[in-house]
Image: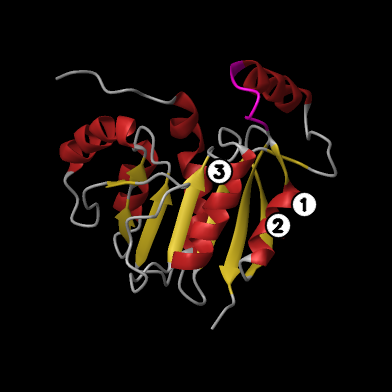
Amino acid sequence: MTQLPFSQACDNNKDPILQVIDTIFSTSTHLLEIGTGTAQHAVYFAEHLPHLIWQTSDQLQYLDVINARLAQYQRPNLPQPLTLDVTSVWPLPMAAHIDAIFTANTLHIMSKVMVEAFFKGVGQHLQAKGQLCIYGPFKYAGKHTSQSNARFDLSLAEQDPSRAIRDIEWIIQLAEIQGLTFVDDHDMPANNRLLHFTNNIN
């Protein structure tokens, strides 16, 4: 069997993330993951949250890896991935029952335009009282939380000037524009955070 791409960071952070989302998504039924990547999170969380349909999605070039990893597990709550570019029309009908959205380590590799499009998509598709969780590094009042994050931010800019660790204040502002309420900011390992929002639009 061909060795699938493996992210050590995903393997390291899956349990701390699960400890938080296990409570947040306890009553959710249909979750959309944006930027599934290697699908390591998807298969692990789907196993430990069997009540939740975990709908994976990513850009077209990543779907072969996602399909291959999902095929190894074939869990009933892991449907086939969706081809999703946040800047295009999301392949979800407005009536789709999406009461949870999760994304990990994506906002800092998106351009500002893509981050704005991400929140517009969340605002369009997340049901009333639905939950949004965003995992990754963030800045506070323009300052990094660690020297390692500052170095990581520089490396992102070297790869692509449109990439950057985002200010949490801007993220909260974008969420509020879409009717989302900031609920909590969870401290996570390796200088990361897990931001929790809920959709209060009826």
Residue topped by disc 3 = 114
Q: Is 184 positioned to the left or the right of 75 in the image?
A: right
Q: Is residue 163 magenta?
A: yes
Q: Amino acid at mark 2?
A: Ile
Task: Mark 1 vs mark 3: give the one in front.
Answer: 3
Image position of 44 with respect to 175: above or below: above
Dot 1 falls on a residue whose secondary structure is helix
Name the image quarter holding the C terminus.
Answer: bottom right
Residue topped by disc 2 = 172
| Residue drawn at point x = 41 percent, y = 69 percent | 28
| Residue drawn at point x = 38 percent, y = 60 percent | 31
Q: Amino acid at mark 1?
A: Glu
| Residue drawn at point x = 60 percent, y = 22 percent | 160
Image position of 17 with respect to 178: above or below: above
Residue 54 position in % (x across, y down): 32, 55
Residue topped by disc 1 = 169
Q: CA distance from mark 1 to mark 2?
A: 5 Å
Which residue is more in the foreground, 133 or 87? 87
Name the image quarter holding the N terminus.
Answer: top left
Which residue is more in the foreground, 184 or 118? 118
Which residue is more in the foreground, 175 or 103? 175
Q: Is 74 positioned to the left or the right of 90 in the image?
A: left
Residue 179 position in % (x across, y down): 62, 71
Dot 2 falls on a residue whose secondary structure is helix
| Residues under numbered marks 1 and 2 in contact, where contact means CB atoms less than 8 Å apart | yes
Task: Mark 2 vs mark 3: give the one in front.
Answer: 3
Stretch of the chain drawn in magenta: 159-164
Residue 200 position in % (x across, y down): 59, 77
Q: Amino acid at mark 3?
A: Met
Q: CA distance from mark 1 to mark 3?
A: 17 Å
| Residue drawn at point x = 67 percent, y = 57 percent | 174
Q: CA distance from mark 2 to mark 3?
A: 15 Å
